[in-house]
Image: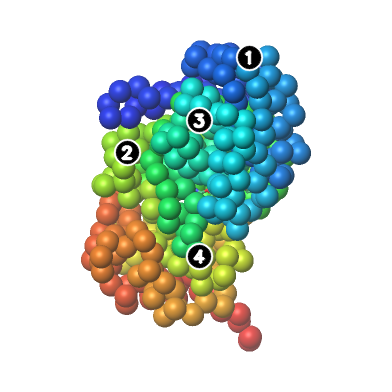
Amino acid sequence: MEKSLTVNYQEKPCYDIIFDRSFDGLSGAIKNLGFENRKFAIVTDSNVDKLYSKEVENIISGISGKVIKCVIPAGESNKNLSEIEKIYEQLILEHFDRHDLIIALGGGVVGDMAGYAAATYLRGISFIQIPTTLLAQTDSSIGGKTGVDFKGYKNMIGAFHMPKLVYMNLSTLKSLDERQYISGFAEVMKHGLIKDAEFYTWLIDNLYEICERDIDVLSEMVPRSCDIKRRVVEKDPTEKGDRALLNFGHTLGHAIEKAKNFELMHGECVALGSVAAAYISWKKDMISMEEYYEIRDMFVPFGLPISVEDIDVDEVIKLTKSDKKADSDKIRFILLKKVGKAVTDTTVTDDEMKAALNEILYVENND
Ligand code: NAD
């Protein structure tokens, strides 16, 4: 079983996304790119290293000149320039040149960092992505956005740098912890909500299998979700227009994430932000009340939250203004016209956001 998609960049085929259930096809795919006998640097994190590095190393060592490994300590707090420096140091020490290859093996943190190192080392060398989280497979490995956090600002330093290949071994999703997997799933739901009503319904129909991580269902879900992201990034590769639709649920979601001091997972905040955005869409007569409640309630069986406690609504609204996606002082909110159709809206007021946040605010009933 092997499926693939081709992603265009500036209207030309740029890289393939290969969906597989093992790493077996990896060396053939790298060979096809013309990197045989070149040096490979596997960039991974301390968790993924223990799980998959050895296997990947064994598979690719047959076609490489030399394989080295750069291991970043796991976690967002290490997505910074000093860890990037350590990667540069290893590459220099091992005499990597422009014809060699960086291989990102891990979640979105590893993909963004390895991609950024590849974008900047010697003014740019090639890299491929081997994403191992649901978020990385369906979202961050596609589209060429790379970067690191800087002095508390998320993804503040970065570059657009397209991978040469995205290779997914869907079986790696089996070892992800439950909360991590479900958090990634929030972005899959989002893809359906903003662009593809049929896919959204399919997700709901396959609830049980998705939660069980049934490999046959994952083999359909991940490529369909990637195809939605592919279509969006192809239309707007450098985030000037349509790509903003991917921020559905993120304006209030990011603000809640910060207000809760990153105690909640990103995808959980995206679910909360999506419920709030759907509520605003209802209040603006873009969707019906029934549609709003249906959208809200469908997050629940997947284990995603639809309410949050202990947030200061005014503080959350303030935090939306410091989101770097805010367009000068106007917030580019993403709302729904219906399931499967998102639109940009710059007219959302603080009062509308406040009402939406009060809707998702969980208040304990003391009766
Ligand atoms: P992550 O990379 O931190 O991975 C989450 C955790 O899962 C880590 O502890 C990791 O070690 C572990 N892990 C990874 N794969 C595993 C596996 N198969 N089995 C067991 N454990 C595994 O987090 P993430 O959610 O994958 O990515 C989040 C990052 O992605 C953020 O930094 C975010 O800014 C970035 N992002 C980038 C884009 C983009 O377009 N470039 C888009 C969305 C998010």
As helix, strand or loop, the secondary structure at mark 4 comes to loop
- 187 left or right of 239? right
Give the residue type at disc 3: Phe
Q: What residue is drawn where x is 48% and y is 42%? A: 116
Callout 1–callout 3 Cβ contact below 8 Å? no
Q: Earlier in the sequence, mark 1 or mark 4?
A: 1
Instruction: Kindly identify the residue that appears in the image at 53 percent across and 52 percent down.
Output: 81
Residue 63, disc: 1
Whether residues under marks 3 and 2 lie with C-beta atoms below 8 angstroms apart, the answer is no
Q: Mark 2 — residue?
A: 237
**Three-letter residue code for mark 1:** Ile
Q: Label 2, label 1: how many angstroms apart (C-alpha)? A: 32 Å
Give the mark toward the camera: 3 or 2: 3
Q: CA distance from mark 3 to mark 2?
A: 18 Å
Instruction: Indicate which disc, 4 or 2, sits on the residue closer to the N terminus.
Output: 4
Q: CA distance from mark 4 to mark 2?
A: 26 Å
Front in this rendered view, residue 133 or 292: 133
Residue hosting label 3? 127
Horizontally, is 5 left or right of 243 in the view? right
Disc 4 marks which amino acid? Answer: Gly
Three-letter amino acid code at the position of disc 2: Pro
- Which residue is nearer to you in this view: 29 or 310? 29
Measure how far apart labels 1 and 4 are at the Cα level: 40 Å
Mark 3–mark 4 Cα distance, whole angstroms, equals 27 Å
- Furthest toward the left, the residue is 347
Query: Percent position (x, y) of residue 297?
Result: 51, 57
Numbered disc 3: secondary structure: strand
Q: Identify the residue position indicated by label 4 in the image.
A: 152
